[in-house]
Image (tube, rainbow, N blue to C red):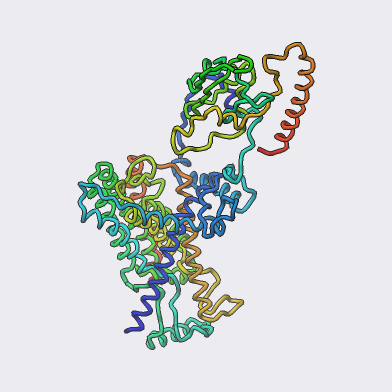
Amino acid sequence: MSGAREKGNAMAKVVTFRRGLWEQLYVPELVRGLGVTLRHFFVNTFGSREIVTIRYPEEKRVYPERFRGVHRLMLREDGSVRCVACMMCSTICPANCIHIEAGEREDSGEKYPVRFDIDEMICVVCGMCVEACPCDAIRMDSGIHMPPVEQRYEALLRKDDLMARGGRSIAVQGGAGPDWREQYERLGEARAVYDRKQAYNKSIKI
Amino acid sequence: MLSIVFATLIKMVIILGFAIALAAVLTWMERRQSAMMQDRIGPERAYLLPPRPGETLGRLRLWGLIHPLADALKLATKEDFVPPKANRAMYAIAPVFALAPVLLVFAVIPFGPPVMLDQLGHVLPRAAGELNELMAHSAAAGQLHQLQVAHLDIGMLFVFAITSLSVYGAVLAGWSSHNTYGMLGGMRAAAQMFAYEITMGMAVMGAFLVYGTLEPQAVVQKQAELGQWGVVLQPLGFLLFLFAAIAETKRAPFDLPEGESEIVGYFVEYSGARFMMFYLAEFVEIVFAACLVTTLFFGGWQLPGLEAHGFSFWALPHWAVVLIQMLTFMAKVFFFCFLQLAIRWSVPRMRYDQLMKLGWKGLLPASIINVVITAGVVLWSQASTAVP
């Protein structure tokens, strides 16, 4: 696979070959082919199994660290939504699957989403919304797939659904501000957590 | 009279039970074996006991051997759809025509040595003369049974006559379902089966010249007499017969009539229990082809070294010898079923013109040459032994 990719710049070449008498006899080549398949058969049945199938509900593949799963909306210290309804995510979304209706917070007058709907059936899982978000409010790091649904409307996730999986972000709402040094130290902690996860992933054979 | 009927019934139960049970296992084996050959797992999830709470995998799965049962249950409970413009009578009878002939031919397959019921507990004598005397005595007393449902002198002719009937199943299914794809599939099947039937007959002609008989039980005993299996005497005949048999049973690389996923076959319109009959017929055909190959070219129920009195170093009672030889036959048949499945999953499908070319221009002339050469050798050896 990788070898073919390395030779990607080579011109395509049509290889024609004449079948000799040995190939045209069919039987020897048939026996050779049987040898290949039967070797796999016996290795997989009686020897060391080389089976690549993962029995899904019982076995699960370990996902990479940056696997994009179902969206979640992050929370502030007080448990309210971090999102400031800036519409960056719904603007950049190539599939137009994010629908936000903005409102005004009663305490601070800050914008917040009254409605925040993501249609997971339309979502193309590109992660652009996460990239665009200026305040770490939307993430796709929940690590789970969209579960199968029976009705289409069940795949339309509301704000509450998205916040149910939300956690606290270590980023400071409204930017780091003057105490960025302190924030940097907290980022260091996050870095340590990240390293631990990486080491864990490496210890598991994928 | 009644005892003969009873004995025949027992023999039918044994051979048909073996054939149908093996065919059912083959439906599972085909998928599981192909999975193993392609580094997959294959069907293994059907279970007899439900999973423990909190688990997703059921218990008592027996490597997936429950799958044939589950499949049969599923197909039997499915809707039996009949296309509105189909010829209903023909549509109903076509699966029977596909299944009945392949079950019929098992009548002449010898699955064990002649059994002397009055000698079951004894060790048979070593000397051939004594053995023949004993057999004659047994036969006179009505205690000698051939392990073969029908002891026909024209045995193999009967086989070829009946197998050619199974063309009707394919053609009728295609024609009666009022579906152009089905019709074309039926025509393909008919053309292919005609082409390869001739090769099949010609390929074994050489073997019959060597054995000097058409009766399958006698064929097996002749191979024991000669001390060599048919495959040694007729290697080309064996290969031709194997290919023709695979084509005749419409298996890959000759599975154009059915072409499970790509080309639509003659039973497109069939569903439910009727589809099951076609499906079963296909797998019984595999067993039957394996039985024929075993009988004609691999010594049938003969196990090398095992005589009627047991091994040369270990005398066995008659019943044990019979049992071992029956098991030998079944093991050989199983091996050839395995081989047919393995060939299916190793070789790509042929194109239709290649198939016809191979049949008419390749295998048929080769089989005729085989017959001519064999006939010459047989004649020469007879002449050289007759004239001092």
What percent of the width, then of the height, locates residue B156? 34, 65
Left or right: where B371 falls relative to B173: right
Q: Residue at x 58, y 43 (%)?
A: A54
Residue found at the far front of this picture: A106
Looking at the image, can residue B367 be seen? no
Measuring from the top left, give residue B68's x and y in whole percent. 45, 57
Image-quadrant location for residue B115: bottom left
Nearer-the-camera pick, B278 or B81: B81
Query: A182 or B277: nearer the eye?
Result: A182
Q: How far across and down, in percent of the image, does residue B195 sit?
A: 30, 50
Residue at 44% across, 36% down: A151
Relative side of B187 to A196, left or right: left
Q: Is residue A171 above or below residue A24?
A: above
- Which residue is found at the position 60% from the left and 51% from the top? B54
Q: Quadrant of the C terminus of chain A?
A: top right
Considering depth in this image, is A192 or B360 the residue closer to the camera? Answer: A192
**Count of residue discs:** 0
**Residue B23 visible in image:** yes
Q: Is residue B325 above or below residue B133?
A: above
- Residue B344 in percent (x, y) is at 45, 48
> Extreme top residue here?
A178
Give the residue at x 32% y 52%. Answer: B79
**In the rendered image of this protein, does residue A151 appear above or below residue B35?**
above
Q: Quadrant of the N terminus of chain A?
A: top right
Examine the rendered structure and indicate whether residue B38 appears above or below residue B2. above
